[in-house]
Amino acid sequence: METIKFKTHRVSYKDEGNEKAIVLLHGFMESLHIWDDFTDVLSKSFRVVRVDLPGHGGTPVMGEVHTMALMAEVVKTVLDALKIDKCVMVGHSMGGYVALEFAKQFPDLLAGFCLFHSHAAADNAEAKENRRRTINIVKLNRAGFIQQFIPELFAKSNVEKFAGEIQNLQNQSANTSGIIAALQGMKERAGNLGLLINTKLPVLFIAGKDDSRIPIQNIMAQAILPSHSEMLILGGVGHIGFVEAKKETLGMIEGFVKRVL
């Protein structure tokens, strides 16, 4: 694992392959290792950069709140160090929020981006309350929260089938302070629907019909906003399409990158 300095911290990342760059961003309580299988394939044709976001994987906690702007700045620091001036960014869930913030701050560095089980709306009042409640649960029983939370991300029909993958994700989960800082950042994040409306960048949406976290209707409504939009809808898939529908999602991302980069 490679690291680079960001202010007083070291950011963990991996840089593999050559030529045109894809940046893969993991989601909440994940690490760059969720992309191991994708990287094995994509790095044969592209340069693949993966980053452990603050408080996740090998990157330490950087404060009580990890805002999406902070995370985007961390990613920008890595890309600057690697002298990457154009890429396609793929963000899973929370990683999609970071990709949106990156697109807002540094649009010239992107050839397009993918919201992989992610969306551009801010948390509503109910979602904010759920985040607050989750923070309290994590403080009391992090291990119990992880045991319950990860399986619920999968379509119910896939939980038994992917028991081993669920265990792997549970093992990757962040520490208590990292989980809380990310939850605070997501609770406070601004909406980026205006960005989707105004962006000239191509946007790929990947959505699961059985996603219990983000209703498919919400993503479909956002997918019509960009002037260049593509969408993959996955039947029988929840919030973890990179596991539940690996072949389909990998193929779609590979094709999208070839079209826009």
Image (cartoon, rainbow, N blue to C red):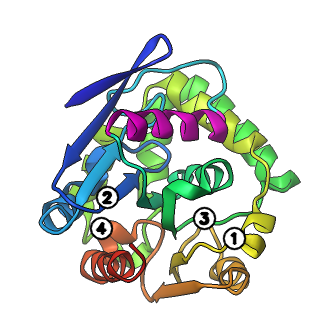
The residue sitting at 15% across, 55% down in the picture is 17
The residue sitting at 53% across, 32% down in the picture is 179
Please, which residue is most extreme toward the right here?
A: 125
What's the mark number on residue 199?
A: 1
Amino acid on which the number 2 mark rests in the picture: Ala
Residue 207, position as x, y percentages in the image: 52, 78
Of circles 4 and 2, the one toward us is 2
> What's the magenta region?
67-82
State how far apart marks 4 and 2 are (Cα): 23 Å
Amino acid on which the number 4 mark rests in the picture: Val
Which residue bears the numbered disc 2? 21
What's the mark number on residue 243?
A: 4
Residue 127, position as x, y percentages in the image: 77, 53
Which of the marked residues, 1 or 2, is nearer the chain's N terminus? 2
Identify whether 151 is placed above or below 138: below
Q: Main secondary structure of the magenta part?
A: helix
Q: Quadrant of the C terminus?
A: bottom left
Using residue 187 as the reference point, say whether residue 36 is left or right of it. left
Q: Quadrant of the N terminus?
A: top left
State how far apart marks 4 and 1 are (Cα): 30 Å
Few, some or many residues within 10 Å of mark 4 (<14, 14–19, 20+): some
Query: Which of 67 and 141 lies nearest the eye of the viewer?
Result: 67
Q: Is residue 96 visible?
A: no
Few, some or many residues within 10 Å of mark 1 (<14, 14–19, 20+): some
Which of the marked residues, 3 or 4, is nearer the chain's N terminus? 3
State how far apart marks 1 and 2 are (Cα): 20 Å
Is 54 inside the magenta-drawn segment?
Answer: no
Residue 205, position as x, y percentages in the image: 54, 77
